[in-house]
Amino acid sequence: MSHRYMMWCALRSYRIAGSIQHYRPHTACDAGSRCAFSSQDAGDGDPPATATDPPSSRKTFVRNATILVQQGCDIQELPVVVRKIGEDEFVSFVSDKIIRPPAPERANAKEGLDCSKQQSSPVSEAEAEAIKCIDKCHSIKGVLTVWDECRDGPGPDVAIRALEKILKVGNLLELKELEEANRFEGLVNAIVYHADAKAILDLLDELRSYLELPKTIDMLGNELVYRCSENTLTIEECCDAIEVLTQCRRPEMVEKFWSGIADQEKSITERNVHFVFTMLPCLKVSRRAVLAVLERRITVLWWQMSPNATIEVLQSLVVCKLSPYRVTQALARWLNTNIHAVAEDELGAVLEAFTNLGYSDAQIERALERYVRAKGVKIASQNLIVTILQHCQEFRLRNAHILNGCSEFFIANYALLEPSHVRAFFYPFGALDFVPANAIKFFDTINMFVDLHFGKIPPTDVIDIMFTYLCLERYPLNFVNRIFNPYFLDVLHAKTRPDRLDTVRGKLKVFDTGLTLECADYDGPLLPRDHSAKAVFHDGRIKRIVNYITTELEELAGGPECMTKFSVLQHLPVNSLYLVDIIFHPAGLGNVFSMNTMKERNINVAVLVHLPECFDSTGKYLSGPQVMRIRHLRRLGLKVVSLRFDALYRLKIHPKELRRYLVERMKCALDALPPPDENRDPAGGTP
């Protein structure tokens, strides 16, 4: 067959004004890629096939093609339906406004299509009798005999019941042989030509367990694709077709339903928008086109959506690993607007989805603040509080109202909490360097809970809890003997994943070092010093910016011999937390690594570069580990200067402003802290 043909195409009705579409046949449009197809439309000039027609009398073929669709600056290559309308002439169905050549047969074809839509007429007595006979059959042969006796053109209900009965009574081998027979193909054609979309969808749903019948599945699936291209399927039916064809392993058919969804953009309402979103994971090639339609609609519909619809939309985006800004912004606005009417489990599901999508904004923070302030200790779900705290930690929301409310919930409900949740309740406070307003009661409750359930808390969680104590300048001496215990350490190593073992060991060493530096009553260090050579992770952004401004730093230090980059002091464990970006030290005063921390105080200066993620969401407060890092360096006798990475990056091309910024920060250097007083009462700092 010749490949020279003309494409009768219509401009898409949903596209942005002024956009252009380019249509081109795909290489799959050859004779080898044709698939048998039956349809209600007799547009190719052939009359509708009957149940007794041989396969050769059926209509021609649907072919695969792609088009280039431009919407604004976005250009995509999408699949479309191409169908023969005459000798060497094809039409690409991409809209319900299709330019067709004049043909006398079209009137009859359209009339047949309209008749097929009116399937609501009751089943005739003859059809009801045929269905009863089919139900009594116990073999494929009996069903086909009843089917052959229906000479007056049995309706689709009889054909559907016959096919369902055949699937029920036949074994797989018989069905595979039967699929090649003309009688069976005529039965399927009767369904394809005359059944409504719901009946075809129900049949395909049953055929999910009969994937060994590819010809039957293809015929039913192709009919749905064709009806979608003619815009005769509703939005819900398009979604059902995508789902069932995905389960039938027909991804190439699924991708063609984008045109039906796009044509019915205005039919997407608050009642069905979540159905379309749940289909996104099934789409690959056309996902962007469908998502573009949904982004436009959700900005109009968000305020009318139900909580369940919102949850389904967000969970679909999580599965697709997509976070489109317009969708997430609209749903965040929905949460803030409807926070008073959202149940606890619904709020937890929405918030967890936002966390998984990596999205948070002022609307979400304001909604959580209002919710916690209104309900507080009346919240019944501890899972919701855990989800709120995880969201705050993930996006560094150092909101006093939210965190204080969560601490009050813990104090009021600690007796009902599961030991496995205590880490999730406590760790965000250390990560955000936030001490609750009710600090004494809060730390007493945490201390009592951990003491009571120590054996039930996972060992890695215990280490994180101890690390949090240290970040908040609390020194849990009553747990030291339990932690630095051979049995506990054996269990810790046995139950920790190998990929996390180095991180857990590092936190344990920081805990030991921190108590040694800050707590006078601690008899440490208890862990041996690590003398082995090891690589320490250092963020490449910090390395590059420090190397870029080395000249300015050397000038401030007094020369290259007065500055050392990227070093760990001998008094600290080899850990990325204690890696000092720059140290200013006097020339000729010996090796900075062997300085006397008791005598050489406020002589050496540690310069630290803090990345944006080292601060809270407002950029005002440093995280708990960074505050502890500064405190420990000051305990060792160093002055500490903090530099912001974003400021250095912005000023690196402005030498004068950069030098002025560095001088100002040097003037604000924090002096060294005195060593811990061995005679002081640590009760105020120890739970």
Image (tube, rainbow, N blue to C red):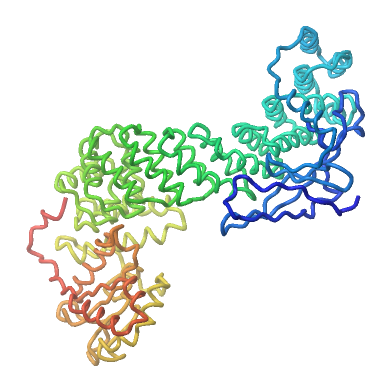
Q: Residue at x 81, y 46 (%)?
A: 90
Residue 456 seen in this snapshot: no
Residue 296 seen in this snapshot: yes
Figure label count: 0
Name above or below for residue 401 compared with residue 588: above
Q: Position of residue 216 (x, y in %)?
A: 79, 32
Is residue 524 shown left or right of residue 32? left
Name above or below for residue 299 compared with residue 212: below
Q: Residue at x 91, y 50 (%)?
A: 1
Q: Residue at x 31, y 46 (%)?
A: 389
Name above or below for residue 173 compared with residue 153: below
Of residues 586 and 31, the one nearer the viewer is 31
Is residue 680 shown left or right of residue 330? left
Q: Position of residue 673 (x, y in %)?
A: 15, 71
Name above or below for residue 509 compared with residue 495: below
Is residue 396 shown left or right of residue 315? left
Of residues 600 and 472, the one nearer the viewer is 472
Asked where in the image residue 500 lies, by quadrant, the reply is bottom left
Q: Position of residue 292 (x, y in %)?
A: 55, 48
Q: Position of residue 19 (x, y in %)?
A: 61, 55
Asked where in the image residue 543 lies, by quadrant, the reply is bottom left
Is residue 367 shown left or right of residue 71? left
Asked where in the image residue 578 lies, by quadrant, the reply is bottom left
Q: Residue at x 22, y 49 (%)?
A: 400
